[in-house]
Amino acid sequence: MNILSTILRLTVCMLIGLQVLTLVSCESKRPKKECPTFEEMQDPTNDTLSDWSNVPAGLQASFISIDDKLPKSVAPEVSINRSVSVSGWKGEKVSAQLLLWSAEDIDQVELEFADFDSEGSKLPASVAQARFVRYVMTDEFGPGCGYRKPEDFPASLAADMLDNLACFNMEAKSVRPVWLTIHIPSDAVAGDYKGKLKLYAAGSAVGDFEIALNVVDQVLPEPSEWLYHLDLWQHPSAVARVHNLEVWSDAHFEKMKPLMQMLADAGQKVITTTLNKDPWNNQCYDAYADMIIWTKNKDQNWTFDYTIFDKWVQFMMDLGIDKMINCYSLLTWNNQLHYNDMEKGELVTVELKAQSKEYTELWSVFLKDFTQHLTNKGWLEITNIAMDERAPADMQAALKVLQSAAPELGVSLADNHKSYQDYPWIKDICVGAGNPVAREDIAARREKGLTTTYYVCCSDKFPNMFTFSAPAESVYAAWYAVAADLDGFLRWAYNSWVENPLTDSRFRTWPAGDTYMVYPDARSSIRFERLVEGIQDVEKIRMLRKKYSEENTPESLAKLNQLEEAIGYFNTREPSSDWQDKLNEAKKLLN
């Protein structure tokens, strides 16, 4: 290489260096590629007074806390931090957050992990994942439940969706978080590891970022072995509509596979099924499609087609969700059910009050047949007839029918009437967060092998998982369950998607994000990742409690006491202003 070409090459490197954060060798080039994606909604809170003039040229980057959620259009005021430390058990999934921002357009932003090295040990780069965080439109809690119009609530963009993109084009005067996930292998050697994350822009290296990973010498079991009772209701019809697929087709099931696998990997215990017409009277954007077809034949006998029900249940079981089948519902929200009337040659819809003779007759026929079918499939012992927020009088009538026609079936109830004590034998009780369950009742139920959990919905301001909620609330929800001695947590909507779920999380009835936790094409969210983080914490607490109790030494009992004191703080839904600091301090104890 002659002197002139060398000078030219160095000049090019310097020019590139002006456009990026750190000057690196021009050898670190990546091939040019297209980075197509959908457009986010225009930021309604774009701060025209936000001063981007002091932002240096090129792509800026810094690690920030995973508790932080920054606006898209405001120049961030953060201290530049090019290193981060994370700690976790073997088998645990841990997170970090890298913030990117630029006053100018930046094309083809990419990230690449290097291996994680320790003394004599190595973890491959493949244990880490970087996902660009996308902004969705959100609103505010307001009155909580109830019909709402978008113009009545201030709108803003919230960082939430984790997109599965290989590269991203950043627009000028914008912020783009990147969510970093490290899956620590169960067979990893405990110790301190050093890793690097390389950032690229327009095919050239921007700089290296240090990741210090501490692997604790404890092993977290596989999600299928977690005891925390997670119940996020699934909505297959929403998947078919968003992806324009025929409901229950092979393509529909194929599209649902990665989405529901993500749920299984979070430790989900329950399969959501339906017995007849949409039990919630189409409260979501999509009505629930039938899983069981009822037919009244010309001879007045009944037949029930369980083909779809069986296919859905087996599909979920094959993914690892196999502890409980909850069937909605013996009490629908509009008291309706429908069936094919072969004599009339049409689909007939009837409205039956739970206290009526017709209700008893019709449901008794079905329940006896259903029980036999479940027995044949080997699913009877894990199946519950499920009811959601139904009035005590209707519950008593329905349970009377159930106990007469199919006493072998279990019962599940999401209770918002403070009536759980009326049914101490119910297998799966989930009580609204506003109605705490007495510890002695939980203990008595646990002695009988019965499950007691709690739920949050549109009426609960904290802790919740709206798109405007603080990210750490998803973690707090699990610590609250432990502090209240509950077995787990229910949320009514895993994927009840709104009209345009990728861009606008608002809905006609509830605070934004209430209807779904994850996004189409198995895109996770900050809310969901942190929900899993909280569940991992619960499992770690369970194991440490057992370990310290069995060791029964002054040192171990002192540690146990310290842990219990930390847990006790979270037995409230009205925490102090420093609750996030308290949570992070408590989490450090687990490691």
Image (tube, helix red, strand yellow):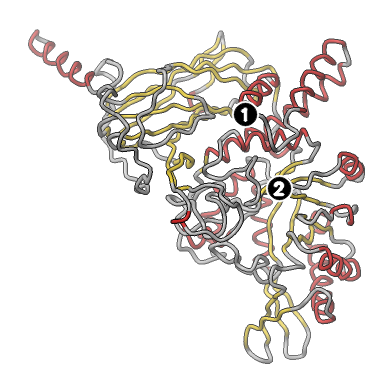
Percent across and percent down for residue 294 are: 70, 77
The image quarter in which residue 411 lies: bottom right
Query: Which sits in the foreground, 363 or 252?
Result: 363
- Label 2 to label 1, Cα distance in Å? 23 Å
**Side of 473 where 196 appears, left or right:** left
* Residue indicated by mark 2: 455
In the image, what residue type sits under mark 2? Tyr
Percent across and percent down for residue 302 are: 76, 81
Query: Which sits in the foreground, 26 or 463?
Result: 463
Residue at position x 34%, y 19% in the image: 207
| Tag 2–tag 1 contact (CB < 8 Å) | no
Rendered view: 354 above or below 478: below
Neighbor class of circle 2 (other Cα within 10 Å; few <14, some 14-19, many 20+) is many
* Residue indicated by mark 1: 577
Query: Which sits in the foreground, 56 or 275?
Result: 56
N-term mark: 2 or 1? 2
Q: Secondary structure at mark 1?
A: loop
- Point out which mark residue 258 bears: none
The image quarter in which residue 101 lies: top left
Which is in the foreground here, disc 2 or disc 1? 1
- Looking at the image, can residue 182 be seen? yes
**Side of 128 where 561 appears, left or right:** right
Residue at position x 57%, y 55% in the image: 510
Q: Secondary structure at mark 2?
A: strand
Neighbor class of circle 1 (other Cα within 10 Å; few <14, some 14-19, many 20+) is few
